[in-house]
Amino acid sequence: MNNDYELIYLAQENNEEAKEMLYQKYKNLMHTNAKTFVMENSDKGIDFNDVLLELNICFEEAINNYNQDNGASFNTFLVSYLNNALKTYKRSIDKKKNKILNESVPLEDDEIDYSNKLYKEEDMIEYMVFDNGNTYESYYDGLKDQEKEIIELLKSGYSYSEIADMLNKDVKYVYNIIYRIKNKLKEMI
């Protein structure tokens, strides 16, 4: 197995396999940081998937910005990079211009509430697409073919990285499609 330094070098040379290996190695760190951040800021209405997407973007940046000559291990560098990103994200949320959105409550009590639940990313899509086993037909019909295909693959139990491999795309592409699906669902609800 390659060590971090070899993988970082290859990833900086745009080797997708090396990026995926690094992602698999550090995804639990990003998930844990995202869950902790959401729980610590539960009063702000922060969405787990939004935080996770932010951390995935920061992970890509950390790979590109890491320099072994600075003396820190990649793990140390990544933890510091993610923590700084979360601090910046929190500052943007705490700005007064976001106060109305952060303190708002739904007008109807019967809306679906995900704020107190944390799911694996694959489970989150299932919750978004299904409500007590009933498919949102109008929502599903409004999806593009690629979005429908990804949902079907997730429902079949494939991971994001497996789906990316099947589609010959980067894992980030799958995350972006899921993010787009999620936003479409929010508009519908």
Image (tube, grey):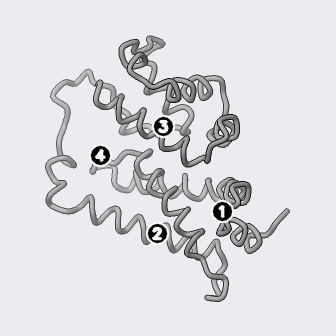
Please name whichever residue, 12 or 77, is drawn nearer the observer in this view of the structure.
Answer: 12
Amino acid on which disc 3 is placed: Ile
Disc 3 from disc 1: Cα separation: 23 Å
Q: Are marks 4 and 2 in contact (CB under 8 Å)?
A: no
Give the label, 4 or 3, closer to the camera. 3
Amino acid on which disc 1 is placed: Asn
Dot 4: element = loop
Disc 4 from disc 3: Cα separation: 20 Å
Residue 83's label in the rendered image is 2
Dot 2: element = helix
Residue 14's label in the rendered image is 1
Above or below: residue 117 compared with residue 32: above
Q: Are marks 3 and 2 in contact (CB under 8 Å)?
A: no
Using a 10 Å C-alpha cutoff, classify the residue at mark 2 as few (fewer than 14 neighbours), some (14 to 19) or many (20 or more).
some
Please name whichever residue, 84 or 18, is drawn nearer the observer in this view of the structure.
Answer: 18
Q: Position of residue 55 (x, y in %)?
A: 48, 58
Which quarter of the picture shows residue 77? Answer: bottom right
Q: Are marks 4 and 3 in contact (CB under 8 Å)?
A: no
Q: Are marks 4 and 1 in contact (CB under 8 Å)?
A: no
Give the label, 3 or 2, closer to the camera. 3
Q: Position of residue 134 (x, y in %)?
A: 44, 11
Kindly identify which residue carries mark 3.
178
Q: Quadrant of the C terminus?
A: top left
Q: Earlier in the sequence, mark 4 or mark 3?
A: 4
Disc 4 from disc 2: Cα separation: 20 Å
Residue 45's label in the rendered image is 4
Amino acid on which disc 2 is placed: Asn
